[in-house]
């Protein structure tokens, strides 16, 4: 894995809720770029450093196993954004 020149403090780690649909923005071996995945768990990778907002999600990969990935490589899918907007309006 190569370093892209950004430190943890300089990245934006979005927060996802369990059950959210996310889209992969980066090419991985075990994931298909542009395909949606369900978030199982989202948490701080370094709980002993609460100031570092390094978020990690757990998802089921194409091979069928659970894996952890940094959230800065993912975004919410279009359908998830619509659902969030509907929930915001209704409730």
Image (cartoon, rainbow, N blue to C red):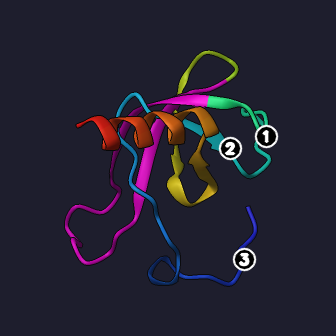
Residue drawn where x is 65% and y is 30% of the image: 36
Question: Residue under circle 1?
Answer: 33
Question: With respect to residue 47, does 85 lie above or below?
Answer: above
Please, which residue is most extreme toward the top here? 64
Precedes in sequence: disc 1 or disc 3: 3
Where does the image place residue 76, in percent across and percent down from the top left? Answer: 56, 45
Q: Which residues are magenta?
A: 37-61
Where does the image place residue 11, in percent across and percent down from the top left? Answer: 53, 76
Where does the image place residue 74, in percent across and percent down from the top left? Answer: 60, 50
Structural distance between the alpha carbons of marks 2 and 1: 5 Å
Question: Residue under circle 2?
Answer: 24
Precedes in sequence: disc 2 or disc 1: 2
In the picture, the quarter occupied by the C terminus is top left
Residue 3, picture quadrant: bottom right
Give left or right: position of 69 versus 16.
right
Structural distance between the alpha carbons of marks 3 and 2: 18 Å
Question: With respect to residue 49, does 37 lie above or below?
Answer: above
Give left or right: position of 91 versus 4.
left
Q: Residues within 10 Å of mark 3 (few under 14, many from 20)?
A: few
Give left or right: position of 87 versus 70.
left
Q: Examine the structure image and report whether residue 74 is included in the region drawn in magenta.
A: no
For the residues carrying marks 3 and 2, which lies nearer the camera in this image? Answer: 2
Give left or right: position of 55 versus 74.
left
Residue drawn where x is 72% and y is 77% of the image: 4
Secondary structure at badge 3 equals loop
Q: Residues within 10 Å of mark 1 (few under 14, many from 20)?
A: some
Question: With respect to residue 28, does 46 lie above or below?
Answer: below
Residue 15, picture quadrant: bottom left
Q: Nearer the viewer, residue 23 or 31?
A: 23
Q: Are marks 2 and 1 in contact (CB under 8 Å)?
A: yes
Question: Residue under circle 3?
Answer: 4
């Amino acid at each position: 894995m190569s370093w892209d020149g950004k430190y943890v403090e300089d990245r934006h780690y979005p927060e996802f809720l369990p059950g959210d649909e996310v889209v992969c923005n980066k090419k991985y071996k075990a994931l298909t770029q542009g395909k949606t995945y369900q978030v199982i768990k989202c948490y701080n990778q370094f709980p002993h450093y609460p100031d570092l907002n390094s978020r990690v999600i757990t998802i089921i990969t194409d091979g069928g196993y659970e894996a952890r990935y940094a959230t800065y490589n993912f975004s919410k899918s279009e359908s998830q954004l619509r659902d969030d907007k509907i929930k915001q309006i209704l409730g």
